Image (cartoon, helix red, strand yellow):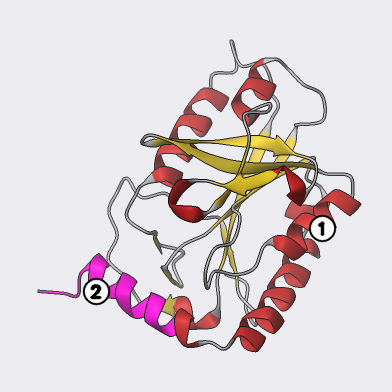
Amino acid sequence: MGISKKEIRLEALKRRDSLTAEQRKAYSRRIIDRLTGLPCYQEADAILTYISFRSEVDTFPLLERAFADGKAVFAPKVCGKEMDFYRIFSVEDLTEGYQGILEPGNSLSFMRAKEEGKPGLQQNLICMPGAAFDRARHRIGYGGGFYDRYLCRLFREGKNAETAACPQAAFTTAALAFDCQIFGKIPWEAHDICPEQIVTETELF
């Protein structure tokens, strides 16, 4: 019997937690610098990004950069078993929410903005967190399935060009991770959604 997702998750989080605060800060800066140099960021009208928690790759430098670059910024909010992204205009719009993670208030959701045909949402970058990844871009999250369900819903609705409010909208997914979270091979299932890119402090998959 191979190693389980749970075992991989625990090992990955142990590795990530073992990084010092100084290492996480420095590596996070490198990751964000690498990400913001990519076309998927530079061409994006909107950035949908997780808000970093505990030992995750720090996304606050990304928020600062996106605000400065005039991007529309959306952050996730959990309600029950579902998640949606809501518009924020500064970090001051975030308050403690699900499991202590900072979340936006009930402002304009990305889904609603898309349905209403808001301008400037044609190119969109979604930044995903995760516990563990492999070089084939498989991802193990934290067990809640929030991103898999959200992306499945978003991509399904986006493909309905006849009724979609933004039929020309395009989405790119990028996961942010430290090198220590990358494994040679991890268990995965057919319904798992792989990020199109994984950005670490030294590599781009």
Q: Tell me if 1 is positioned left or right of 152 in this view.
A: left
Magenta-highlighted residues: 1-15
Give the mark nearest the N terminus, 2 or 1: 2
Residue denoted by label 2: 7
- Residue 150, compared with residue 202, is above or below; it is above
Mark 1 lies on a secondary structure that is: helix
Residue denoted by label 1: 64
In depth, the one of 180 and 91 nearer the eye is 91
Residue 184 showing in the rendered view: no
- Mark 1 and mark 2 in contact (Cβ < 8 Å)? no
Q: In the image, residue 89 lies at what x, y percent?
A: 80, 41
Q: Dot 2: within a 10 Å radius of its alpha carbon, few (fewer than 14), some, or many (20 or more) residues?
A: few
Mark 2 lies on a secondary structure that is: helix
Q: Dot 1: within a 10 Å radius of its alpha carbon, few (fewer than 14), some, or many (20 or more) residues?
A: few
The disc labelled 2 sits on which kind of residue? Glu
- Residue 36, compared with residue 173, is above or below; it is below
Residue lying at 52% horizontally and 31% vertically, measured from the top left = 154
Q: In the image, residue 123 lies at what x, y percent?
A: 74, 38
In this view, the mark in front (2 or 1): 1
Asked whether residue 10 is drawn in magenta, I would say: yes
Residue lying at 69% horizontally and 23% vertically, measured from the top left = 113
Residue 9 showing in the rendered view: yes
Quadrant containing the C terminus in the rendered view: bottom right
- Cα separation between marks 2 and 1: 35 Å
Spot the residue most to the left: 1
The disc labelled 1 sits on which kind of residue? Glu
The image quadrant of residue 118 is: top right
Residue lying at 40% horizontally and 75% vertically, measured from the top left = 13
In depth, the one of 128 and 84 nearer the eye is 84
Residue lying at 81% horizontally and 65% vertically, measured from the top left = 37
